[in-house]
Image: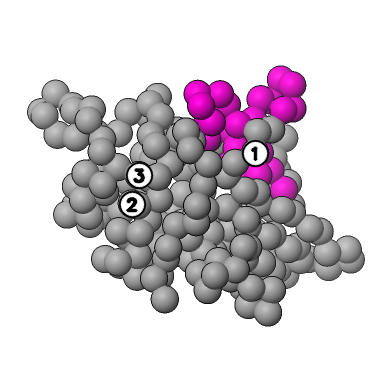
Amino acid sequence: MPYIPAPIDSGITVSGSSVRSIVEAVKSFSVLVGVLLEVMKVQTKDASGALVVDPNGWYPLEDYLLAYKKIDSLLGGRGLEKVGAMVPRNAFFPPNITDIRQALQSMDIAFHMNHRRQGQPMFDPETGTMLEGIGHYLYQPVEGRQELILVSETPYPCRFDLGLILGMAQRFEPAATIAHDLAQGCRQKGGTSCTYAVSWP
């Protein structure tokens, strides 16, 4: 079943650095890059006149989600997973993030920091204030085991999240694996969330 973006609050934008990471992830598919920039209505041009993502700009989330739909239609679910897995490779991690648990526990804050609602940051690190409107990544530790659960209630595609979470986990634990607990539902099949079990040796 193809990815269908979930309804989201209006006025949500996503950071140019996030948009740029997706474009970087698919740059080996030069035709796809042009299509994605067109779908996202990117207007900025470089010195040669080519469309480029402004890393300091903000882009409508609706257009950004359409880009994922385009990736799904052109590359399929595995393509979405590959794109998701590539994002953490170039991501900056604060020095206090040193292991897999800390990295995955911080995903919801990082997710909100890269989105704005009506021009306001969706997470303010100084006050700890988090705005609602884009869902959450919910972290659940599994006591006594090298395992954790991450529940995604975001508007992003299930298969993208699968790759993103695994890519993030493998940055800190290269042998980490992930399993989608379909018994808990799936956004791609009409559910409100997806549940992922991450484990490592």
Q: CA distance from mark 1 to mark 3?
A: 19 Å
User: On screen, 175 above or below 23?
Assistant: below
Please tell me whether mark 1 or mark 2 is closer to you in this view. 1
**Residues at badges 1 and 3 in contact (C-beta under 8 Å)?**
no
Helix, strand or loop at label 1? It is loop
Give residue 63's mark. Answer: 3
Residues packed near mark 2 inside 10 Å, few (<14), some (14 to 19) or many (20 plus) = many
Residue 17 seen: no
Residue 134 appears at what percent x and percent y? 57, 44
Q: Name the quarter where the N terminus is drawn.
A: bottom left
Residue lying farthest to the left in this orientation: 48
Magenta-colored span:
105-129
Lower sequence index among marks 1 and 3: 3
The local secondary structure at tag 2 comes to: helix
The residue furthest bottom is: 183
Q: Amino acid at mark 1?
A: Glu
Which residue is labeled 2 in the image? 67
Residue 118 belongs to the span the image colors magenta: yes
Q: Position of residue 94 (x, y in %)?
A: 64, 33
Asked if the residue under mark 3 is in contact with the one under mark 2, i.e. CB atoms within 8 Å, the reply is: yes
**Please, what secondary structure does the residue beneath circle 3 have?**
helix
In this figure, which residue is indicated by the disc labeled 1?
132
Question: In this figure, what is the number of numbered marks?
Answer: 3
